[in-house]
Amino acid sequence: MWSLETLGRVRLSRHFFMRDFLYSEIGSFHEKQNIPDDPDLAIETGRAFCETLMDPLEETFGRIAVRSGYRSAALNRFGNENRLNCARNDHPLECHIWDRGRGEARIAGASVVIPWFADRYAQGRDWRDLAWWLHDHLDYSEIWFFPKLCAFNLVWRPVPLRRIDSYIAPRGRLVVAGEEPPVPVYDRQAAYADFPPFRGIRYP
């Protein structure tokens, strides 16, 4: 039997615990619980997400702010039905419900902000500079950028799609799944030449 206290103490990776992803503004305001139906699956999938994507970000840029992490199916459904910026539970790109699917159908994601880049974005830095860095350094599946703070949804899947979209101008698809980016690698590297050196350590 899992208790919420025990669940929150589960360490997902070098830098992250399950508790880091359980807080929900929707749940807090509307007094809705955010507890996994399948804690073991949520942990398994969340661990892969954190080890593969979140740890390298934290080690390179410093503390990463989680804007929206795990959502239970019930909480996400409530958010969708009440138009609170939650996709349908059965939407193929809904990434916040970590305890659904098995094998290659698993998915985990979070909306995050990199404070180091948010400061530069506020001064006019192009969001695509960060997008190209993410594309060239992380084994991500999908990324969606949002105008506020240059937050983005970062998604892990066992078989990544490698797709980037944005609601920031120029809006639309930056990288099409299964295709090479339209910008050559040397131009991408020039866009983030002043970024901190990559410090992520790949798990075996």
Image (cartoon, rainbow, N blue to C red):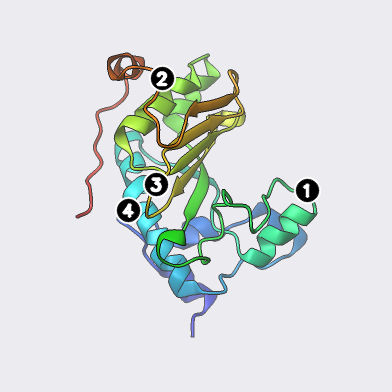
In three-dimensional space, the C-alpha distance between marks 4 and 2, rounded to whole angstroms, equals 29 Å
The residue that appears at 46% across and 47% down in the rendered structure is 155
Give the quadrant of residue 167. top right
In three-dimensional space, the C-alpha distance between marks 1 and 4, rounded to whole angstroms, equals 32 Å
- The answer to the question of whether label 1 and label 2 lie on touching residues, with beta carbons closer than 8 A, is no
Please name the residue that numbered disc 1 is placed on. 83
Q: Secondary structure at mark 4?
A: helix
Q: Which mark is residue 160?
A: 3
Q: In the image, residue 112 lies at what x, y percent?
A: 50, 41
Q: Is residue 196 left or right of residue 158?
A: left
Q: Tag 3 or tag 1, which sits nearer the N-term?
A: 1
Q: Tag 3 or tag 4, which sits nearer the N-term?
A: 4
Please name the residue that numbered disc 4 is placed on. 51
Q: Tag 2 or tag 1, which sits nearer the N-term?
A: 1
The crowd level at tag 2 (other Cα within 10 Å; few <14, some 14-19, many 20+) is few
Q: Is residue 165 left or right of residue 162?
A: right
What amino acid type is highlighted by mark number 1? Arg
The residue that appears at 30% across and 55% down in the rendered structure is 14
Residue 171, visible in the rendered structure: yes
The crowd level at tag 4 (other Cα within 10 Å; few <14, some 14-19, many 20+) is some
Please name the residue that numbered disc 2 is placed on. 182
The crowd level at tag 1 (other Cα within 10 Å; few <14, some 14-19, many 20+) is few
